[in-house]
Amino acid sequence: MRFGMPWPGVDVAREAEQAGVSAFCTGDFADHDAYTTLAEIVANTERALVGPAIAYAFARTPYAHATAMRQLHAKAPGRLFLGLGTAAFRINRDWFGVPADRPVERVAETVEAVRAWLHAENGETVRYSGEFHSIDADVRAPVLGRLEVPVLLAAFNKRMAVTAGRVADGVIGHGLFTRSWWTDVVRPAVTKGAAAGPRSEHGWIITAVDDAAPERAIADARRMIAFYLTVKTYDPFVAHHGWEVPVTRLREAFRTGDTDGMAAAVTDEMLTEIAVCGTTTNAKDMLGRRVGALPRDVGYFAPPSFLVGHKRRAAYARSALGLLGSVPAEV
């Protein structure tokens, strides 16, 4: 497998690429745009695999996703992937003002409609007809031509993982993923959906390393785990691991704004199964013990972002470089 990281900025990224990081990803949120950041990544990297992990699927039309990738392909041929995710129901409804029902069916069509644009040949009408998307585009300008950009789908629970296997080129795993969730839930579901052979795996790894202040790094990792688990979408994951009691506690703390209480509710078992954190030595040990629990193709060392500023995230990204080489490349 190869290791990557969410885009840490130009200075850290140059160090990272020289150190052996071979993939960078970006994403969407209220203060940053996946494709704007991806353009910066393309302009400041030379060899790394790059792409959104993830772009909000329903915040843009399939045309907009594909056009962004087509333009960036001219600068980074053969290096791009496109990761799409549905986002939460309320984000789609309240932020984007788009229909939020039936996300599994909608994102499956979105992947197919994006591919219709990516695979479009010059001189041919671009067509797609589905329940949610319809394309009948006669593009006379010679600006098309088939692009083989892998389309990956963020999948957490079983239905989405089956869909990723069925319609996408691969799956993007969440930072919460454990060995058991990969091996017992996600991989079997992706395989069930896949009729055309194996699918690639990307995934986030919550990573916080600080040799000078390991306790702070561990606390940041605990808070990140707790923040993720406030979302009820992940209840099947919680039940699978038998973590209902600590998750109930962290959700109660979240409701009262008690962020320290949220972190305290994350058990040592949860921390060990999910994160890589503490000193470099401890983090290497944690990473080594997670062989088999990591995504097969690309794992992103992802610094905690909940209540963690940009400077500290950049420091965590630099510290993560010390973990390179601690897991065999063939794993």
Image: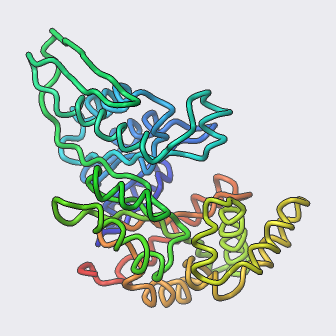
Left or right: 272 with respect to 63?
Answer: right
Is 112 left or right of 257, judged from the image as shown?
Answer: left
Residue beneath the point at 48% across and 35% down? 58
Here the colouring is: rainbow
Q: Residue furthest top?
A: 140
Identify the image quadrant of the C terminus: bottom left
Q: Identify the residue shown where x is 10% and y is 19%.
A: 124
On the image, the x and y values in percent for residue 318 come to: 51, 65
In depth, the one of 253 and 53 nearer the eye is: 253
| Vertical placement of residue 123 versus 74, above or below | above
Q: Is residue 263 above or below residue 30?
A: below
Q: Position of residue 1 (x, y in %)?
A: 29, 72
**The furthest residue to the left:** 123
Q: Is residue 2 above or below residue 163?
A: below
159 sits left or right of 142 in the view: right
Q: Residue at x 16, y 27 (%)?
A: 120
Give percent across and percent down for residue 295: 37, 71
The quarter holding residue 289 reads bottom left
Farthest front residue in view: 131
Residue 135, quarter of picture: top left
Query: Which residue is nearer to you in this view: 173 or 157?
Result: 157
Seen at 36% across and 44% down, the residue is 108
Q: Position of residue 111 (x, y in %)?
A: 33, 41
Classify residue 187 by image quadrant.
Answer: bottom left
Q: Nearer the viewer, residue 148 or 90?
A: 90
Question: Is 296 placed above or below 160 here?
Answer: below
User: In the rendered picture of this protein, how many numbered marks are placed on residues?
Assistant: 0
